[in-house]
Amino acid sequence: MQELSRRRAVCAMPIAGSYRSIDFTLSNMSNSHIQKVAVFTQYNARSLNEHLSSSKWWDFGRKQGGLFVLTPAVTAENSNWYRGTADAIYQNLAFLKSSHEPYVVISSGDGVYKMDFSRVLEYHIEKKADITVVCKEMGSDVGVERFGTVRMDEDGRIEEYEEKPLKAKSSVISCGIYILRRRQLIEMIEKCAEEDRYDFVRDVLVRYKDIKRIYGYKMRDYWRNIASVEDYYDANMDFLKPEVRNYFFKQHPDIYSKVDDLAPAKYNVGVTVRNSLISSGCIVNGRVENSVVFKKSFIGNNCVIKNSIILNDVYIGDNAYIENCIVESRSTIRANSRYTGDEGRIRIVVERNERYTG
C-alpha cells in the first residue's frame, strides 16, 4: 500500500467515488450514538486533517463530546512519534482520564463496513468480558495470514490469538475493533508503558488472553480492510455490485462524509459508460467500463477506461487507454498514452506531466 499512502494516510484513501475510508468508522460511531471520538494520526496526516476539519458531517459538532484529532506532541517528558497503538493511547492518556464514559471502542480507520457498536457492547456485558474483539469468518479463498487470527471456544471466549501467522490455524480473523472498560484500558496501557511495550495486539491481547476474559463477537455482514493495493482495488470494485451499493447507501443507517459543492458529472455526446461509478465534478468524453472515477476528473475524447480506479482530479488526454490500473490523484495522462496492468496485478500510475499545454 506504500505506493498509494505516500501522499496520504491509509484511512484517508478515497472509497466508492465520494467517500474516505475513515468515513465508515466515524459513521458507525455516530449511528451508535457515540458522542466523543478521538482520531490518532501521525503519518501523512494533511489530507486526513483537511477531511476532518469540521466534525458536523458525522454529527460530532456538539456541546458535549465532539471529534478530536490527536497527533504526537513534543512535551517535557516525551518527544517520540506514536510507536504503536498502545503508545498512541498512552501519549494521550489525559484524554481518557478526563472522559467520563465507562466503555471505550477502539477501531482502525481502514475498514469498510457497517456496525452497530451498541450490539457489541451488549454482547460484551452479557459475557462479562474484559475485552471483546470483533471477528469475522473469512472464506477459503482469502489468505488470512496477513491478519490476526483467533480461535474461540463454544462460548465465544478466545483461546488462541496469532498475529499474522506464517500458517493460519483458523479462518476467523480479528477486524481490529475492540471494546473494553475505560478504567481497565488505562491500567493496561500504563502497565505497557512501564515495561516499554507499545503494541496493543501483541502486548495486550496476546499477553492477557489467558489472564483476562477476552471474547470474540462475530460479525456476519460485509467487511473489508484496505491494507494492501489489491484489497483497496477490490473494495472499490465491490461498489459496482448493486447489492453492495444498496447495503451501504440505501439501507439505514447511512454513511456520512464531507460534502463538496461540485456540479453533477457531465457526459458529453457519444460517450459510453457501463457498470461504473462517476463522481460529481467529472467530465467524460470517452468510454468507461467497470471502473470507479473519483471527483473532478476529466476523461478526453476517444479514451478507453476499463477495470480501473481513477482518483481525484485526474486529467486524461485524448485517445488514452487505461486498463487494470489505479491512477493517482492529480495525475495528468498525456494524449495517446497506454497503461495496462497484468491480470491479477494492479498497476499504479503516477504521472506529473504539465496540464493544459498548447
Image (tube, grey):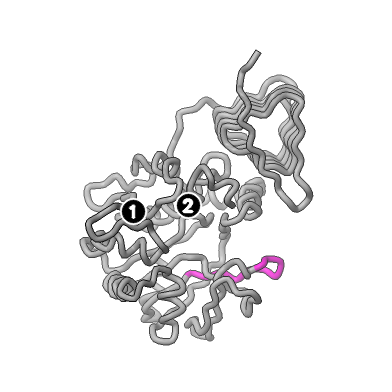
Q: Which mark is residue 310?
A: none
Q: Is residue 210 above or below residue 237?
A: below
- Residue that numbered label 1 is attached to: 72
Q: Residues within 10 Å of mark 2 (few under 14, many from 20)?
A: many
Q: Nearer the viewer, residue 332 or 247?
A: 332
Q: Would residue 48 be seen by someone viewing this image from the given angle?
A: yes
Name the kind of residue labelled 2 in the image.
Phe
Is residue 345 left or right of 215 when viewed as pictured?
right
Magenta part mainly helix, strand or loop?
loop
Horizontal and vertical percent position of residue 1: 59, 52
Q: Quadrant of residue 307?
A: top right
Q: Quadrant of residue 321?
A: top right
| Upstream in sequence: badge 2 or badge 1 | 2
What residue appears at the point 63 percent right and 37 percent down from the top-left corner?
350
Q: Spatial distance from mark 2 to mark 1, Cα to Cα?
A: 24 Å
- Asked if the stretch drawn in magenta spans residue 141, the answer is yes
The span picked out in magenta is: 134-143
Locate the C terminus by quadrant. top right
Q: Secondary structure at mark 1?
A: loop
Name the kind of residue labelled 1 in the image.
Pro
- Residue that numbered label 2 is attached to: 24
Q: Is residue 226 above or below residue 192?
A: above
Q: Secondary structure at mark 2?
A: helix
